[in-house]
């Protein structure tokens, strides 16, 4: 495993992450919430590696991060009126994950067979710089399935079932995940309360 600490502008860290992801690797990256394991959805072997690192059941699909809401239409993600309101809200970019439907006629191969996907646009310059160069990534919290995510790289790697190809050490991060809202349901349902309180989401949705 290669370990990189971002310098003040993060340029070398971004380059290292992009190179790893483009070459089919798995990278441990600091997000605006918890550390995440990321890979290109186009690389089946790297996706398999993430499941093994987390000991995650294969029936539990991996969430997606994108750089901007525009990217959602390019991969066939369906946006309900509630989802569009939230995507245009002060919570995005930020610690808000939306569960949305998929248009199978427009979806890429790596979304085949899925009816729903969890998406997020992070409020992290580092992550956005990476995503702008790689396109959509599968990014999931860097923890063994069912366990909390540790605050630092050393503890995370110690707990995983193996090591990622690259670790970007962003220091100590939060262990609070994003808030998850299922926008396929009407009215939308908050399925996980995280960094954004439920009352703020409900107040914005009216």
Image (tube, helix red, strand yellow):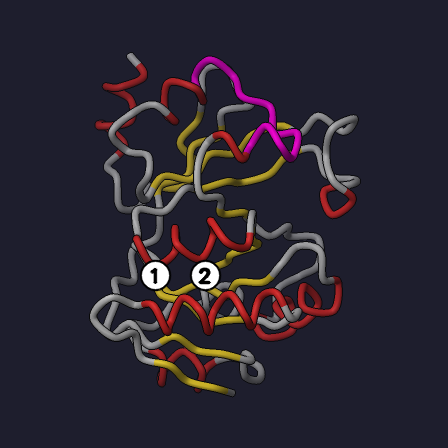
Are dots 1 and 2 in contact, CB under 8 Å? yes
Residue 154 badge: none
Residue 170, horizontal then vertical, whole percent = 29, 72
Judged from the image, the secondary structure of the residue bearing numbered disc 1 is: loop
Residue at position x 28%, y 27% in the image: 201
Of callouts 1 and 2, the N-terminal one: 1
Give the x, y percent position of residue 137.
56, 53
Which portion, as a residue range, is magenta?
Answer: 72-82
Residue identifier under label 1: 34
Q: Can residue 148 be seen in this view?
A: no
Camera-side residue of 129 and 161:
129
Q: Does the segment drawn in magenta span residue 76?
A: yes
Q: Nearer the viewer, residue 174 or 103?
A: 103
Mark 2 lies on a secondary structure that is strand
The disc at residue 141 is 2
Residue 44 counted in the magenta span: no
């Amino acid at each position: 495993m290669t370990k990189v600490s971002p310098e003040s502008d993060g340029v070398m860290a971004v380059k290292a992450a992009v190179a790893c992801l483009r070459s089919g690797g798995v990278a441990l990256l600091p997000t605006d919430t918890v550390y995440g394991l990321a890979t290109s959805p186009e690389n089946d072997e790297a996706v398999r590696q993430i499941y093994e690192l987390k000991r995650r059941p294969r029936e539990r699909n991996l969430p997606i991060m994108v750089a901007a809401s525009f990217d959602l239409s390019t991969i066939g993600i369906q946006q309900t009126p509630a989802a569009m309101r939230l995507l245009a809200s002060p919570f995005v970019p930020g610690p808000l994950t939306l569960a949305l439907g998929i248009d199978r006629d427009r979806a890429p191969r790596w979304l085949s067979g899925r009816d729903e996907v969890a998406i997020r646009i992070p409020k992290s310059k580092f992550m956005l710089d990476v995503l702008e160069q790689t396109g959509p990534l599968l990014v999931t919290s860097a923890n063994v399935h069912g366990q909390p995510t540790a605050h630092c790289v050393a503890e995370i790697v110690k707990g995983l079932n193996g090591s990622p190809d690259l670790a970007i050490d962003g220091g100590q991060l939060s262990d609070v995940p994003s808030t998850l809202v299922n926008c396929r349901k009407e009215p939308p349902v908050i399925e996980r309360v995280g960094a954004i309180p439920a009352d703020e989401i409900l107040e914005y949705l009216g």
